[in-house]
Image (cartoon, helix red, strand yellow):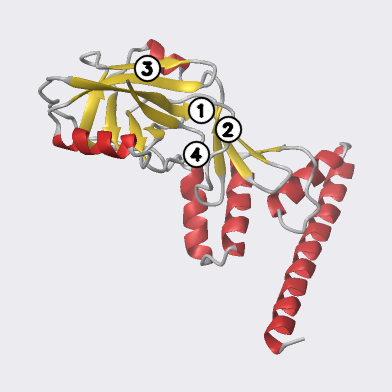
């Protein structure tokens, strides 16, 4: 065995032993607390394993986490990827503090002319996002219902940038609906927009074809999956700022397309 391989194996074994020691300590503390409280420790042990993640005897089902536990789990995973502990803690705190809240400048709109039509899904229900920095996300069915009842002013934009405004609910060039698959949009985009022509070309060539949306989360739930992912489930949103057409969104299952 070469020296680099031997060193790598030794480091992996050290990581495994550290993880096992942490889990043993958590098991011991949990068992003693559970015994004192006269509760079944199995649920707490599953949660402890879920927080530790790698080499910790992961549970075979998704485990609910509190916000504090989710922050710890995200921090653990980020540091294991080699991220500095200070930066990892900042990112973990930001994830729990609704770091995806965004504000957008007001737009004066655009002059309408000939149009081309687009449609798609800015969000999909019960699907996992890409890794968003130590955690993944999914949208629960009905998460948009309360906001849509308020008939919000929402823009369709390119890559979450209001300099590239395409359509809007205010003039009814954008229509939103929550269906079984997710948040659907249908829109008409002015042909006279120079960037609209660019977008149409890219969509026609299949280079741009995903969707996304900007929002502040409302009710959320945290959990850990059997494979070690920390998951934030969005049960509701507080507002909907935009829906967007993009080449690469947080959810690869989304789709946008030209009509006709």
Check the image and report above or below for 243 versus 36: above
Q: Position of residue 9 (x, y in %)?
A: 75, 77
Looking at the image, residue 11 sits to the left or right of residue 38; the answer is left
In contact (CB < 8 Å): disc 1 and disc 4 = no
Marks 2 and 1, how far apart at CA = 6 Å
Q: Mark 3 highlights which residue?
A: 176
Q: Mark 4 highlights which residue?
A: 252
- Residue 124, numbered label: 1
Disc nearer the start of the sequence (3/4): 3
Q: Position of residue 88 (x, y in %)?
A: 51, 59
Q: Quadrant of the N terminus?
A: bottom right
Marks 3 and 2, how far apart at CA = 20 Å
Q: Mark 2 highlights which residue?
A: 127
Q: Quadrant of the C terminus?
A: top left
For image coordinates 39% across by 36% down, the residue present is 209
Q: Closer to the camera: disc 4 or disc 2?
A: 4
Check the image and report above or below for 189 versus 46: above
Looking at the image, residue 23 sits to the left or right of residue 216; the answer is right
Q: Residues within 10 Å of mark 3 (few under 14, many from 20)?
A: many
Q: Nearer the viewer, residue 86 or 140?
A: 140
Marks 1 and 3, how far apart at CA = 13 Å
Disc nearer the start of the sequence (3/2): 2
Q: Quadrant of residue 164?
A: top left
Disc nearer the start of the sequence (4/2): 2
Marks 1 and 4, how far apart at CA = 9 Å
Q: Nearer the viewer, residue 142 or 72?
A: 142
Q: Secondary structure at mark 1?
A: strand
In contact (CB < 8 Å): disc 2 and disc 1 = yes
Looking at the image, residue 102 sits to the left or right of residue 57; the answer is left
Q: Residues within 10 Å of mark 2 (few under 14, many from 20)?
A: some
Disc nearer the start of the sequence (1/4): 1
């Amino acid at each position: 065995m070469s020296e680099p391989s031997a060193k790598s194996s030794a480091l992996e074994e050290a990581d495994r032993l550290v993880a096992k020691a942490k889990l043993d300590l958590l098991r011991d503390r949990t068992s003693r607390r559970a015994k004192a409280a006269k509760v079944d420790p199995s649920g707490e042990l599953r949660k402890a394993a879920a927080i530790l993640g790698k080499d910790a005897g992961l549970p075979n089902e998704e485990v609910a986490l509190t916000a504090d536990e989710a922050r710890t789990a995200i921090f653990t995973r980020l540091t294991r990827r080699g991220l500095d502990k200070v930066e990892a803690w900042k990112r973990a705190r930001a994830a729990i503090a609704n770091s995806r809240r965004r504000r957008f400048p007001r737009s004066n709109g655009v002059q309408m002319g000939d149009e081309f039509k687009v449609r798609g899904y800015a969000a999909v229900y019960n699907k996992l996002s890409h890794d968003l920095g130590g955690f993944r996300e999914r949208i629960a069915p009905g998460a948009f219902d309360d906001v849509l009842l308020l008939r919000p002013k929402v823009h369709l934009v390119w890559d979450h940038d209001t300099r590239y405004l395409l359509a809007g609910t205010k003039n009814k060039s954008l229509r939103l609906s929550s269906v079984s698959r997710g948040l659907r949009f249908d829109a008409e985009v002015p042909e006279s927009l120079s960037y609209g022509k660019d977008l149409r070309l890219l969509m026609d060539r299949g280079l741009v074809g995903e969707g996304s949306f900007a929002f502040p989360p409302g009710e959320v739930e945290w959990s850990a999956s059997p494979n070690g992912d920390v998951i934030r489930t969005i049960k509701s949103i507080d507002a909907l700022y935009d829906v967007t057409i993009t080449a690469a969104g947080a959810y690869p299952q989304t789709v946008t397309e030209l009509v006709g």
